[in-house]
Amino acid sequence: MFASSSLSGTISIDCAEDYEVPFTTQNHLFDHLDMADKQDDFSSLYSDDEILDDDDDDSYETIPNKSLIYQKRWVKLDADFLRYFDNDKDMYSKRIIPTTSITNITNVGDQKFEVVTHNRTFVFRADSDFERTEWVTVLQETIRDQKYTHKDLSGQHLHGAAEMQGYLELRGLRSKLYVVVSGDKVLLYKNMEDYKLGIGITSIDMNVGNVKDADRRAFDLTTPYRTFSFVAESDQQKDEWVEAMQNSIGEALSNYEVAEKIWVDEFNQFCADCGAAKPEWAAINLCVVFCKRCAGEHRGLGPSISKVRSLKMDKKVWTDELIQLFQVLGNRGSNTFWAANVPPSEALSPASCSSDRRRFIAAKYREGKYRRYHQLFGNQEALDNVRLTFTLERRLR
């Protein structure tokens, strides 16, 4: 399943990038939509964004200009990024395309569609016209949502301020990558131009990272999924990169401290509204935890209804008392009231579109449509008897 607008599951598609000059390196990268190798019909995808594997295949040197060669990819679309991988087991993507950088989505015949960005065009092919229509519809809706929220298009703002950035050699590749250390992540780009546009290769969460010294100007960034062996231009730069990445690890571990405490309750490990895993936002007055996509709709309710705070960034808000309240009450207790009567036909899923989220969240919290009613609700005679009993008891005290 992928978190997108109107699709409820994964689909297999082929992808290729429209490029001007053939690029001669092979790659491997990270993020979601489902794909598997198809041995008979398609050869390897030759594109200048696939650059995270050993570069030792000479077959990448004879590609005709402007040709498109397809290969099955696992693709994932969420509110912020369209990403694709070799398969659903890969943790690091081959390409990250911010949805804010997408300017147009067009059909181009035979189950194919183009994703047009500011500096290049990506061509995808689905298994059927129906699947192609689903993808085009979802992507077009995502673009409309981005325009509605007026998100910034620059890479720096998409990923936050950079603590350190520059070119590093990644062993196994013929060309250097543009590497950015930003907050609790390390991001890899093909070059500085792609960084400015926000179109990256992959993102490495540093809460699972570790930096180790290697020989000379080299150092390793290790994760449970793979090791990135970098080489700096000088010993001094190596020390600066190692320090920046170690600081990023420290920030990542600190950022997740509140989230880990709140996720102790298993009900808080999923969005209170759509069920998406590992929610990182909360309404501190409603005592519910929710995902990034639902957080945008909660903000739309206004702070008088939902006071939205981040589990990772708003550290001063999260006192021990508030964390304990979320552990005791949280999604479990709050949803027994706010979501006691949700019809299955109106329930959200992680794949729900923005308009469905907006409608559901407004109905749930602003209108109280699904809330739990007292057993005497609607029984005026019974309520009058309770009120009379309460009044008599007060007078007798």
Image: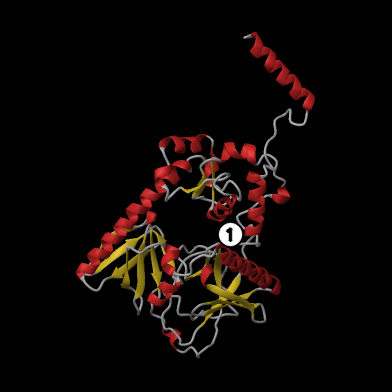
**Rendered location of residue 26, percent (x, y):** 43, 78
Relative depth, front residue between 208 and 383: 383
**Rendered location of residue 341, percent (x, y):** 70, 41
Residue at the spot 57% in from the left edge and 80% down from the top edge? 42
Which residue has dot 1 on it? 3
**Rendered location of residue 95, percent (x, y):** 48, 71
Relative depth, front residue between 22 and 72: 22
Report whether 27 appears left or right of 134.
left
Relative depth, front residue between 269 and 295: 295
Residue at the spot 41% in from the left edge and 85% down from the top edge? 58
Residue at the spot 21% in from the left edge and 72% down from the top edge? 234
Can residue 191 be seen in this snapshot?
A: no
**SS at mark 1 in the image:** loop
**Rendered location of residue 303, percent (x, y):** 54, 47
- Residue 189 lies, with reference to residue 345, above or below; the image says below
Q: Quadrant of residue 111?
A: bottom right
Can residue 4 be seen in this snapshot?
A: yes
Relative depth, front residue between 330 and 376: 376
Callout 1 amino acid: Ala
- Residue 389 lies, with reference to residue 171, above or below; the image says above
Q: Quadrant of the N terminus?
A: bottom right
Tally of marks:
1
